[in-house]
Image (cartoon, rainbow, N blue to C red):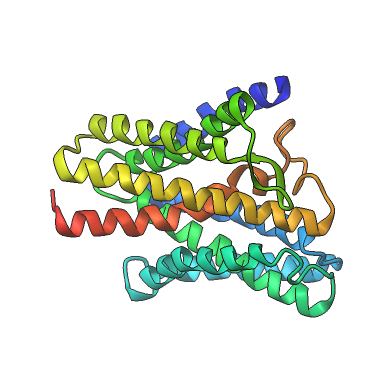
Amino acid sequence: MKQRIITSLILAPIAIAFILLSPTSWFAGLLVAVWAYAMWEWTRLIGMQQLLARALVVVTGILLMLGLWRVRGESAWWLCISIGVAWWLFALAWMRRFSFAASPNKRNIAIKLLAGWLVLIPGWVALVQIHGLPGPRGTWALYALFVVWAADTFAYAAGSRWGRNKLAPRISPGKTLEGVWGALVGSGLIALIGGWWIGARGAPLALLVVLGLLCVVWSILGDLFESLMKRQANVKDSGALFPGHGGLLDRLDGVFAAMPMFALGKFLIDLYFPA
């Protein structure tokens, strides 16, 4: 826990400063590097052994993100975000079949590689979209991230104090239903306070809170899916990049899942309640 706190105190101010101070083009460029490293961890997690093959996957991912940047705001951009929302319903069905694609053979590695694209690429597109929303630079990106980060914190606090009923014991024995309720209540409050501070009122504020709760649900799916991948790979963490926190996937699994939901939901709110 001490390592986790120290790491968070070092990384959080750096991340917040970059979100708020960087133009969206710079922000997107840094995220390409972050997402590329996440893909590198993913290739190891799913059982790819050859370094050249893993490197080619990462390069392909980088080229895909650069290509999507060139069509930002167009139909392909929004199709990617929509796929990123819908994918997690399929992931939920996958998690209900615990042993699906568990064996590390070529077929299953290919399935998990495709899943990696569906996890990572829409998450990058969505977070870039959110960062570029009208208003003070990076405010909406920070808001969306705080809602997800708060879910982790409140889930841990509630689960540690009141946790009795397991959420998905075969996938992640430490997660409880009480932790889920803690995440929903805590993040709902953050969504309400943050939305008010940004300037939302009335129906848009209420819808932001609802959207925040949906993002929490999606972030939990992201967390559980990565836990399933780790269970099948028989590893504790996706990597060792952050002392006390594990790898990049361990820190961003909920973000990958929640950002497409937030980007699409915010678009719909703005569509029906233009500023």
Left or right: 268, with 119 as reference point: left
Name which residue lies at 45% across and 60% down.
Answer: 125
Q: Nearer the viewer, residue 180 or 70?
A: 180
Quarter of the figure that contains the N terminus:
top right
Q: Is residue 31 visible?
A: no
Tell me where residue 165 appears, x and y as whole percent: 63, 39
Q: Is residue 23 left or right of residue 2?
A: left
* Residue sitting farthest toward the bottom: 107
Write down the quadrant of residue 40 in the picture: bottom right
Q: x, y percentage for residue 194?
A: 31, 32
**Where residue 121 sits: x, y (%)?**
53, 64
Is any atom of residue 223 visible in this view? Answer: yes
* Depicted 200 relative to depicted 82: above or below: above
Q: How many marks?
A: 0
Q: Residue at x 33, y 42 (%)?
A: 140
At 44% from the left and 63% from the top, the residue drawn is 85
Task: Please give the name of the residue rendered at 36% of the width and 51% of the height, measured from the top-left corner.
Answer: 130
